[in-house]
Structures are given as C-alpha cells and as structure tokens.
Amino acid sequence: MVGLWAVGLPVWCEWDQTFGWRYRWWTDTNTDTGDRKFAQCAGIATDTAVRRIVDRYWELHGALVASPKLRVPGENAVSTGG
C-alpha cells in the first residue's frame, strides 16, 4: 500500500478473483453512513490508474490548500499598495 498521506489518499494493489490484479484508492466518504467509497482500475492499465490517482491527488490537494485552517494571520493577505 502506498499512502499519499499529506492529502489522505491511500492507494493499494490487490488480487480479486473476478478482475485479477487491480489498483484501488479512496474517492470519498458517504456522508449518510460514514462508509468510504473506493475507485478501482485494472492492474494492467497502470497508465490509466496513475492518471486517475494523480487527478484525485490534485483534487484533494486543492481542497487542502483552500482550507482556512491552513491560513496564517498576516499571510495570504492582498497588498493594496498603501
């Protein structure tokens, strides 16, 4: 399992009797039940899996950067030239 922990994105490869080797990663949490939803991609489609995982990484990264919890007072301020 590889974890892109900075953004909370676990990624792993697992064997499935129906699909063979596949990549899986967390996509979201069901707000009603708290259960996690996962995406998957066939193990032989590495380029597709990487593209989808990178897209999810940047989606989570953008949400993390936009979080007001990360803002430091005095930083991220817009200068008015005054």
Image (tube, rainbow, N blue to C red):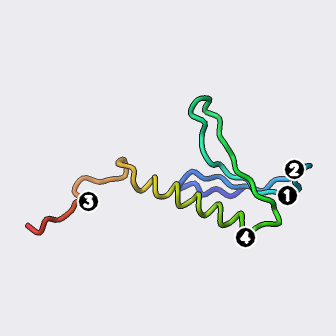
Percent of width and height locating residue 37? 66, 42
Chain-order first, disc 3 or disc 4: 4
Q: Are marks 1 and 2 in contact (CB under 8 Å)?
A: yes
Above or below, comparing residue 32 to residue 7 in the picture: above
Residue labelled with disc 2: 16
Residue labelled with disc 1: 21
Percent of width and height locating residue 8? 57, 51
Residue type at mark 2? Asp
Rounded to the nearest angstrom, the CA distance separating label 3 from label 4 is: 38 Å
Rounded to the nearest angstrom, the CA distance separating label 4 from label 1 is: 14 Å
Which mark lies nearer to you, 2 or 3?
2
Rounded to the nearest angstrom, the CA distance separating label 1 from label 3 is: 46 Å
Residue at (68% x, 58% y) in the render: 2
Chain-order first, disc 1 or disc 3: 1
Which quarter of the rendering shows the C terminus?
Answer: bottom left
Q: Secondary structure at mark 1?
A: strand
> Residue 49 appears in which quarter of the rendering?
bottom right
Rounded to the nearest angstrom, the CA distance separating label 2 from label 4 is: 20 Å
Residue labelled with disc 4: 47
Percent of width and height locating residue 73? 24, 52
Residue at (58% x, 29% y) in the render: 32
Q: Secondary structure at mark 3?
A: loop
Which mark lies nearer to you, 1 or 3?
1
Rounded to the nearest angstrom, the CA distance separating label 2 from label 3 is: 48 Å
Q: Are marks 1 and 3 in contact (CB under 8 Å)?
A: no
Residue type at mark 3? Glu
Which mark lies nearer to you, 4 or 1?
4
Please state if 19 lies on the left or on the right of 54 as rendered.
right
- Checking the image for residue 75, the label placed there is 3
